[in-house]
Image: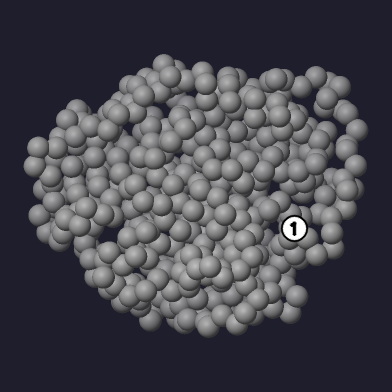
Amino acid sequence: MSSTLTELTRPQPVVQPREPDSVADRIATSAAATAGRLTTDAFHDWFTARGKAGRFSVERIPFSKLRGWSFEPGTGNLVHSSGRFFSVEGLHVTADDGLHKEWYQPIIKQPEVGILGILVKEFDGVLHFLMQAKMEPGNRNLLQLSPTVQATRSNYTKVHKGTDVKYIQYFTGPDRGRILADVLQSEHGSWFFHKSNRNMIVEVDEDVPLDEDFCWLTLGQLNDLLHQDNLVNMDSRTVLACLPAHGSPLPHSDGFTGALARSRDPEAGALLTDVDLLSWFTAERSRYDVRAERIPLVDVPGWTRDEARIGKDDGRWFDVVAVEVQAGNREVTGWTQPLIEPSSRGVAAFLTRSFGGVLHVLANAKVEGGFLDTVELAPTVQASPDNFAGLSVRPPYLDLVLSADPDRIRYDAIHSEEGGRFLYAENRYLVIEADEAQAPLLPPAGFQWVTVGQLSELVKHGHYVNVQARTLLACLNAMGVRSCDPLTDPFANSMGTRAHD
């Protein structure tokens, strides 16, 4: 499947011009717009005001204080009395290859498919995205920017007997508008068993009543906000990653920015053709013999339950804990629930190189126990470094990412994961420019060079690109869209780096 020198230097294909009013062009116009219905300052004033307007609190509690939740006799599974929402069960995984060939763990089983949907509408010739200031109990700062709709089936069918999910009719009704994206995507395969959400982007022309917890933003504004820590939530990032590929090729631009712009073009010269890439990925899925079996939570060895946590005996990976939540602006204003709490912050990073003037990212065909199809494309590195402290076997490229020269870091931000199920789950997301010695043309087994455009094409199909790689795809699409002055633009770190604790 590797490329020859001839392939690397072959002429670029001629790209046929798009129709002037194509979806991609309209999205590109929105991406270039850094002000719209709200200025950036007005957005931050609104977001701060929404935080002050709500009554938010999250308190850890012992399992005995959970309301409507209990440990099931016999299995020990943590279940809800309604039989809905989700349960915490056990999982036994065996694999014939990889760092870990057998393990046991708790895992969330949530069979229902939720909706993650963003409503878009054109104002003054520019597409705007309807975003929500939403509280999630597991978010580090509680309030983050979420999609228009972020709801499980239990939510929008009102199993919880709360108020209606706002704007749900635009995603489930017969007259919901023009579909720009609609695809089932996986969630975290390490913590969910076979969990999928329907990622949707729907355009409407009609007037849309604006609730006080919602605002219209251009894609350019969202791209700027993606460079801030813990602001744009995971559900927004995965939906934004489903946008059609967009942006100008900039054929005469040099350096990383130009290579990235060309990489977004689905017709740009890639090391592998789309057919060869799919063939490689199919071979990766076929070569693993992975068996993931749900088992009673009480039968998970190496994990101990006390009155307030279920944790691994060596303190690694994660705990299952319980919380009491108060949220004045949610469909239900108070509840209790279990959450998964990681033991430490993770790292999700793409190594990149340019081949023939086109940026490629090094994707990893990664096995996770909860995946529906065994393997999905993941970042080059996706790991929590503390989990490997003192171990002789470490994930490939982890040490390279952790010791990366700051001058080679092109994107660097901390983002929260699903705040509705995970407590303080954060990853440091990085895009790092590598050299030939660090990341050769012919990568090791399980890794492959892919363009941004190819990733965007794969995201049109479910269960090909995992949620961490989709976040990085959204971040890559947010980079280098416009030039910025680092002295006057507070979001200028899109092409630089900064220190994190």
450 horizontally vs 98: left or right: right
Q: Residue at x 36, y 42 (%)?
A: 192
The colour scheme used to paint the residues is one colour
Quadrant occupied by the N terminus: top right
Residue 409 vertical position relative to residue 173 in the rendered view, above or below: above
Q: Residue at x 40, y 45 (%)?
A: 195
Q: Position of residue 53 (x, y in %)?
A: 38, 81
Q: Position of residue 360 (x, y in %)?
A: 71, 36
Q: Residue at the front extreme?
A: 174
Residue 427 vertical position relative to residue 158 in the rendered view, above or below: above
384 horizontally vs 210: left or right: left
Residue beneath disc 1:
24
All told, the count of numbered labels is 1
Badge 1 crowding class, 10 Å Cα cut-off, few under 14, some 14 to 19, many 20 or more, is some
Relative to the observer, which residue lies in front, 98 or 498?
98
Q: Residue at x 30, y 44 (%)?
A: 108
Badge 1 element: helix
Q: Residue at x 45, y 30 (%)?
A: 374
Query: Can residue 289 be seen from the camera position used here?
Result: yes
Q: Position of residue 495 (x, y in %)?
A: 68, 52
Relative to the observer, which residue lies in front, 145 or 126?
126
| The quadrant where residue 102 appears | top left
Residue 317 vertical position relative to residue 127 in the rendered view, above or below: above
- Identify the amino acid type marked 1: Ala
Query: Can residue 322 be seen from the camera position used here?
Result: no
Q: Position of residue 408 (x, y in %)?
A: 66, 41
